[in-house]
Amino acid sequence: MRGAINRRTFAQAGAGLAAAAICPCRASGGSTSDSPAALEVRPYQLMCVICRLGEGRTEDLGDRRLTEILRFVRRDRKTPVRLRMNVDMVYRYQNPGPADDTPEGELFNAKRDLDILQRLGLVPGDARPAIDMFERVLASISTSQGICGSKSTGPTWRGCAKAAGGAYEKGRAAGINAILPPRDKAEKAEFKKRTAAEVYAAKELRIRPHHLLCMSCFYGGHAKLAPIAEDNLFEAIDAIQKNPNLPITLVPGCCMICPPCSHFDPATNLCLGGRSMALRDQKKDLDTLQKLGLKYGDTLPARELYALVFQKIASPMEICGYGDGKQTAPEWSICGSAVKDAPYQKARKESLGIRRMKGAR
């Protein structure tokens, strides 16, 4: 892949161009900063974007519509992508018409789109944030063979000439960062330095509820605690070990742990992790609050809050595994700590190291 970019450089160099490239007739719904318009695409176009990137293209994909799609989702990775295709049954209410059909013919176009939806576990009209949708394609479809091209049984089923070239497979191997620019490393480092210092200077910590469990698993999962680049878990643990009476206020959404994370978006203060990470996190937060009998805005000394956590939550399976450990969809994946909970049990037994600290105020 040529000319790797990241979110910061793309925003600086291409935001205006991306805005100009959006085709209004392909978007639907109201558009606000909290509710962006949905980008309506054919399922096959998702694979085509990956295929064109696998050919070595970076911005201009050699097709106007595919280039529009790429610019749109790079402009905002949380943009809803709605899948539409032409069907002849009850889902025909969303039929987009044949304008975006490729030259292989009506039957091939219909079968290809249905094949992709079946692999993705979705139906016509389904929508997901762009980051979720592309990660789902990458995880679910390993090759274009059998979808975009296969052994021809006649002119109707000759398929796409590019399918045998390996471009889709190369694009898939490049991963999600080739499609959606990753967060700038220098920016991450800046946020790590600044926000880690803020944790230590804070008169109270503002933590989202389920991160209390993340802190526990981080503590129990390391023989020796040390800072990491991706979050402020260590710093929060260290701060409350040094001052067990430090107040913790429970807050919704991203908190003091999050700013260095690759998935954190400073512009919106949102988590842009794939596979609906933010959706899972919100459920975990609410499940944690329910277990503790608390609500957002409640503040307790760290020592008291963790005593309550370890009393009320016997295992992370109750929160991070939804109680039964069953994954009902890719969006509802199970955290590894819910299955192997030895780190949490260590933290629970040792009260996050708070009791063992000498000279704590």
Image (tube, rainbow, N blue to C red):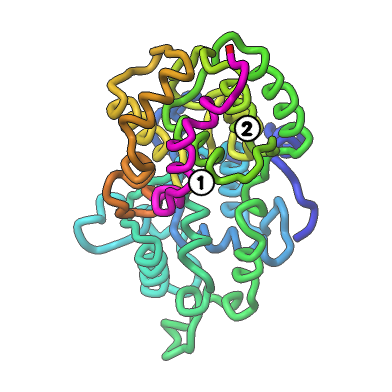
Residue 25 in sight from this viewpoint: no
Q: Residues within 10 Å of mark 2 (few under 14, many from 20)?
A: some
Residue extending furthest toward the top? 203
Place residue 359 in its image quadrant. Answer: top right
- Nearer the observer: mark 1 or 2; the answer is 2
Give coordinates of residue 235: x percent, y percent: 64, 27
Q: What's the amino acid at mark 1? A: Gly
Give coordinates of residue 128: x percent, y percent: 42, 45
Which numbered tag is attached to residue 167? none
Question: Is the residue under label 2 in contact with that under label 1 (CB below 8 Å)?
Answer: no
Task: Work out how far the residue at label 1 is from the one at label 2, CA to CA, in angstroms.
Answer: 24 Å
Give coordinates of residue 55: x percent, y percent: 70, 66
- Residue 76 shown left or right of residue 337 in the figure: right
Give coordinates of residue 177: x percent, y percent: 65, 51
Q: What's the amino acid at mark 2? A: Phe
Place residue 322 in its image quadrant. Answer: top left
Find disc 2 in the rendering and name its residue: 234
Q: Nearer the viewer, residue 57 or 182?
A: 182
Find disc 1 in the rendering and name its residue: 274
Label 2 element class: helix
Q: Residues within 10 Å of mark 1 (few under 14, many from 20)?
A: many
- Residue 272 shown left or right of residue 313 in the figure: right
Residue 31 in sight from this viewpoint: yes
- Residue 162 shown left or right of residue 211 in the figure: right
Could you tell me which quadrant the N terminus lies in?
Answer: bottom right
| Residue at the (53%, 24%) spot, across then down | 255
| Residue at the (43%, 32%) spot, across then down | 210
| Residue at the (33%, 39%) spot, across then down | 314
Task: Give the residues drawn in magenta, as a range.
Answer: 333-360
